[in-house]
Image (cartoon, rainbow, N blue to C red):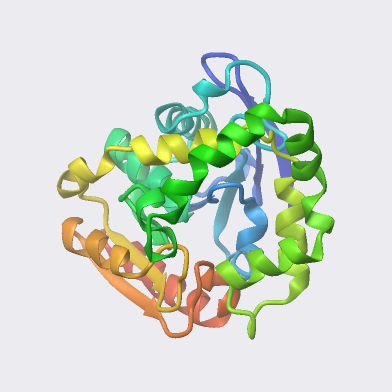
Amino acid sequence: MFKTNHPNYFYTSDGIRIFYNTNFLQSQLDPNRPVLVLIYGLLCSNSHFKFQIPYLEEKGFQILIHDYRFHYASSQDGDIETCNFPNITKDLHELLQDLGIKKSIFMGHSMGVNICLEHARRYPEDMRAQILISGTVIPPQDVMFDSNIVDIVSPHLKTFTEKYPSFFKMFWRHSFKNPVAQYLIFDGGFNKKQVEMEFIQLYMKKISELPEKLFFHLLKIMHDHDVINYLELIKTPTLVIGGDKDKIIPNYLQRILTTQLPICELYIVKDGSHVPQADFPDRINHRLLRFIHKIESIK
């Protein structure tokens, strides 16, 4: 994914193996420039930043990407209940400390917004700024698709999956091959005029690599996340981005973040979906660059 790629593993204080990539060697870390830390969303992957990574790398930025516990190349063993926001942020905090990285700029998408905010709450010394794309601090079950349909349906779906675990596991592993499932994801989360179906197919293929029980678990921790009570205490400079055609997380939720975070600016992307960084990468990249340069200019 990087032009200059340095994959590695890190073991947390509780023995969890975290996989990460940087586009720089630790010995070459420039402490005078921020490291951009990219944080993906619910059942997503770093491929959601496929248009940002080469652009930012070409601009000379140091970049760190990683997989959370129970995700992809990181450890998927043990109790899935340990995959929660306090632990995910602690894992990243320890990784940053191990690499000697200070005052990063975090960029989170969807559930990655919750992780960024939790990190800013717990470890503000790690962050110079944050960029929050298409997130919500309101339980997503209450607002997805601008209704509570997910809150109504998900308990029944969970019961079904527990009653027929083999069927659900087979469906989970092979749904990326189903053109109907591909279209539903495409129509619900993306601007179909701007994003290629290949992007959706890769997204769904990556989902099939995750434990099938992870979806309901992560939805629950997002539902229970209480960071909304701490927004006024988060002093990290923030850029909030949303798409005005986001069907999954309506963009009025971005305005809630903007009004509650003390140092914050808002950018709403015309015709942007839940993944505006894939819909309109040029617009997003230019806006990111402007914000990052602004943060760099602050002494």
Visible in this render: residue 18?
no
**Res 199 quadrant in image:** bottom right
35 in relation to 264, above or below = above
User: Where does residue 222 sit, x and y in percent of width and height?
Assistant: 41, 41
User: Where does residue 129 sit, x and y in percent of width and height?
Assistant: 34, 55
147 in relation to 234, above or below = below
User: Where does residue 282 sit, x and y in percent of width and height?
Assistant: 56, 81
| Residue in the foreground of this view, choosing between 246 and 118 | 246
Quarter of the figure with the N terminus: bottom right
Quarter of the figure with the C terminus: bottom left
| Residue in the foreground of this view, choosing between 10 and 269 | 269
Visible in this render: residue 127?
yes
| Residue in the foreground of this view, choosing between 133 and 156 | 156
User: Where does residue 245 sit, x and y in percent of width and height?
Assistant: 45, 78
| Residue in the foreground of this view, choosing between 76 and 297 | 76
Relative placement, left or right, of 236 versus 46 is: left
235 in relation to 145, above or below = above
**Res 254 quadrant in image:** bottom left
Relative placement, left or right, of 36 versus 177 is: left
Picture residue at 58% right of the left edge, 47% below the top: 64
Picture residue at 43% right of the left edge, 28% below the top: 90
